[in-house]
Image (spheres, coloured by chain):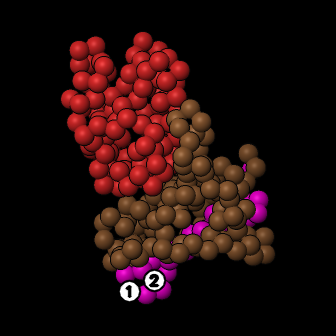
Amino acid sequence: MTIEQTQVGGKVVLHVAGRMDAETAVQFEQHCDSCIAEGSTNLIVDLCDLTYVSSMGLRSFVTIAKKLRDKGGELRICRLTGLVRQVFELTRLDKVFPLHDSVESALMEG
Amino acid sequence: MTLVAKAESLGPATEFVRKGAREANLPEPRVGELELLIEEIFINVTRYSYPEGAPGVVTITCSIPAPGELAVEVGDQGIEFDPLTAIPPDLTLDLMQRPIGGLGILLLKSFAKLVTYRREQGWNRLKFTISANP
């Protein structure tokens, strides 16, 4: 899994590619924790190149989203595809997170 | 194949079922689902079946019950646990009420064509089937 971080107008966008599984989910969580420690309250996560997510990855999304909510912010998820979209839909996490079809639309929301 | 029930064994376990998927001619989207299922079961065994600090073994067997179908059986000698009787998670809860985990068994039941569990002479044996045509 690779995580590429960009800063767009004061907002952090994380482009997460590859596989988020039992081994790599912790890497994502730690990266988000660092962003939160540096003052980010909204994180935009672009998943267009994420090909796989297991329940361990879902745990990380829920954990980070709760931390952001506690700080008055949110985790915005963009561009789910394939198996990853299926997993979010089956677990109804697509109803829990604000989902966006593009990074631009996530950036425009406040 | 027999492996030590620890997180590091997930890679060889995944490779083993991938080989089974190739032999069963499963298409690529089904292979991704298969990898997901083996991870969910494997992680459950390593985290919950064996007491901490006392890892046991996990066995994985692949068979092809019908053309385009792969059956995978995962066995462990840990604490007796039938995941099929676990209380399903409440998917209507909002973010702050959602528990952190508990979704793995739901994914298993959703993606597998058939899932069975039996306790046999001290072994948990969880078997699932994945089909080229879900």
The magenta segment is B53-80
The image shows residue B78, relative to residue B129, as above or below, that is above
Label pair 1/2, CB-CB below 8 angstroms: yes
> Is B85 in front, or is A108?
A108
Image check: A32 left or right of B121? left
Side of B47 relative to B108 (left or right): right
Residue B73 on the magenta span: yes
Q: Residue B1's x, y, as percent? A: 56, 70
Amino acid type assigned to the residue bearing label 2 in the image: Ile
What residue do we see at 53% from left, 62% from top?
A: B108
Which residue is drawn at the image coordinates 51% and 48% (left, top)?
A55
Q: In the image, is residue B56 above or below residue A80?
A: below
Is-magenta flag for residue B77?
yes
Comparing B69 with B77, the one in front is: B69
Q: Which residue is mark 1?
A: B67
Q: Which mark is residue B64?
A: 2
**Chain bearing mark 1:** B
Crowding around mark 1 (Cα neighbors within 10 Å: few <14, some 14 to 19, many 20+) is few
A30 lies left or right of A52: right
Amino acid at circle 1: Pro
Chain A tint in image? red
Identify the chain drawn in brown: B
The C terminus of chain A sits in image quarter: top left
